[in-house]
Image: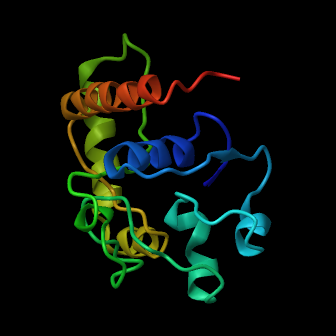
Amino acid sequence: MASSGNGSVSHVFGELFKMMAGADLVHVPYRGGYVPDLLGGQTQVVFGTIASCIQLISAGKLRALAVTTAMRSTALPDVPVMGESVPGYEASQWYGLGAPRNTPAEVIDKLNKEINAVAADPNMKARLDGLGVDPMSMTSAEFGKFIADETEKWGKVIRAANIKAE
């Protein structure tokens, strides 16, 4: 199982799969790109992002077995979700915007409103869909809870897999 390094998203997604599926995969961390070894057969699987793999999948050089998100991807609509084979498996990479702690609430609310509007724009949504990116519009309070939940979930995986910082 190739990954982009110890503790990386691809590593912890694979560790969650190993735990939930009872799979015996050997983790092979890469500091550089793992794609040549994956395409050459030196490694057999990677939990890569759609954005990083979509061109190889579209070109027929890489086979997508499943997406790790809870819902099928608009970029890969024929690829099943991992949860269909491993019930309860869900893992998604996400990005968010933050502001300093003392930022006034009205500024946070305005930023949140504008960011959510951009994410809902049909042209932006189409561009993001093509990359396999699904915006999650939420309030700042919802985002705070989401971060706390994700921290708890992945902390358990990291502890169980005994992943250490390099």
Q: Quadrant of the N terminus?
A: bottom right
In the picture shown, does residue 65 fall above or below 24? below
Q: Quadrant of the C terminus?
A: top right
Quadrant in the rendering for residue 103: top left
Name the residue at 40% across, 32% down.
Answer: 157
Residue 98 position, x and y percent, is: 42, 29
- The foreground one among 24 and 111 is 24
In the picture shown, does residue 115 fall above or below 83? above
Residue 159 position, x and y percent, is: 44, 22
Residue 60 position, x and y percent, is: 61, 89
Q: Is residue 35 left or right of residue 147?
A: right
Q: Residue furthest top?
A: 102
Name the residue at 23% across, 67% down.
Answer: 84
Q: Is residue 48 left or right of residue 110?
A: right
Name the residue at 39% across, 25% down.
Answer: 155
- The foreground one among 9 and 126 is 9
In the picture shown, does residue 108 fall above or below 30? above
In the picture shown, does residue 46 fall above or below 130? above
Q: Is residue 94 left or right of residue 32?
A: left
